[in-house]
Amino acid sequence: DRRRRHNLIVKELASRLTGMKLFEDPFDVLALTDSVGVLIEVKTLDGTRADEVDRVREALSQLLYYEAFVTSPIAGGTVVRKIACFEHLISEEHRQWLNRSEIAVIWKTDTGFTGDALARATLSDYLD
């Protein structure tokens, strides 16, 4: 069930990124234009604090790893911003911690996606 929810979020998110070329595998979404890119890792949540801690740590490590070792051959010289997408709102403490590592945070809502100030600044032109 968790994998199914994850895949549905990835598909919905990708369908809302307008005007960007999309890539996947090993990351969830890499979306590029000629001038900017976004690397997005999606995490589902079971509602417990322990699971949130695990998923936030996974998102951080995956995004940093992909940035360092995977995206460069695809993105070339394009500046790629990192975004962690969660199934629902995570704690303010975790959002701020991710932001300090230059990782924007978005989360699923009933009508689409919303995010923190860093995410809105990064995605405002591209997220439907």
Image (tube, rainbow, N blue to C red):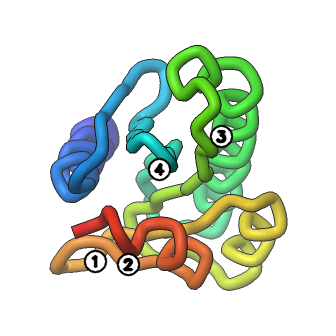
Which residue corresponds to mark 4? 43
Tell me the quadrant of the picture where the C terminus can be found: bottom left
State the CA–CA distance, disc 4 to disc 1: 14 Å
Identity, as a three-letter code, of the amino acid under mark 2 = Thr
Q: In the visual, does 73 lie left or right of 103?
A: left
Q: Which residue is mark 1?
A: 109
Q: Earlier in the sequence, mark 2 or mark 1?
A: 1
Q: CA distance from mark 3 to mark 4?
A: 12 Å
Element type where label 2 sits in the image:
strand
Q: Which amino acid is tagged 1?
A: Thr
- Tell me the CA gap for discs 1 and 3: 22 Å
Residue 84: mark: none
- Occupied quadrant, residue 2: top left
> In the rendered image of this protein, does residue 119 appear above or below residue 15?
below
x, y percent for residue 57: 72, 49
Viewer can see residue 63: yes
Q: Residue at x 47, y 50 (%)?
A: 43
Q: Earlier in the sequence, mark 4 or mark 1?
A: 4
User: Residue lying furthest top in this view?
Assistant: 73
Foreground pick, 76 / 15:
76
Residue named by callout 3 = 63
